[in-house]
Image: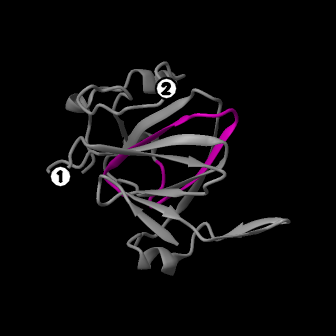
Amino acid sequence: MKVIKTDLPEVLVLEPKVYGDDRGFFLETYHRQRYRDVGVDVDFVQDNHSKSAQGVLRGMHWQVARPQAKLVWCISGKIYDVAVDVRPGSPNFGKWTGVELDSDNKRQIYVPAGFAHGFCALSEGVQIIYKCSDLYDPSDEGGVIWNDPAIGIRWPISEPVLSTKDAVLPPLSAAKLPR
């Protein structure tokens, strides 16, 4: 597995080894010891599968009292995936990094606990799978508006399709931060 550093030292892009031939391909999407060996030392407890239409932006979310680490990959289509450091007191607080993930490059992004996560669908019929280190609790959700100028994420789309909930998220300065 190849590990690619990002602008945020804790956020990693991972390229699993892909074995392919004219029949198709095989890859390990997760192997606990191999991931621990490259710094992803997390016990994942929940897997999620999300489908989005082109132009949909989901995020930016986190859990407040029980922050989740996530391992995300795109199994169909192409997304732009973003992580923002929202850990109070972090030297990188409010900084972000983004990466394209798609079903061809098979890259994954590791988003540690204490980081906001979101993505936008760059192609039609995007599907992602992601592992979480803690169970989702809707009453524990925090978030920040996708276009907060204090963060300055450079999204590759300008007029995303948002959920009602995501459209009214606060700016980082007013958000309920992870503990």
Q: Residue placed at 49% from the left, 63% from the top?
A: 14
Secondary-structure class at tag 2: loop
* Of residues 138 and 106, the one drawn nearer to the viewer in this rendering: 106
Depicted 75 relative to depicted 152: above or below? below
Q: Quadrant of residue 106?
A: bottom right
148 and 19: which is toward the camera: 19
Residue 147 picture quarter? top left
Q: Which residues are magenta?
A: 112-136
Name the kind of residue labelled 1 in the image. Answer: Ser
Query: Residue 143: percent from the left, percent from the top?
Result: 36, 35
Is tag 1's residue or tag 2's residue first in the polypeptide sequence? 1
**Which amino acid type is shown beneath numbered disc 2?**
Ile
Q: Residue at x 20, y 49 (%)?
A: 92
User: Seen in the image, is 144 located left or right of residue 163?
Assistant: left
* Residue that label 1 marks: 90
Location of residue 156 in the rendering, given as x and y in whole percent from the top left corner: 47, 30
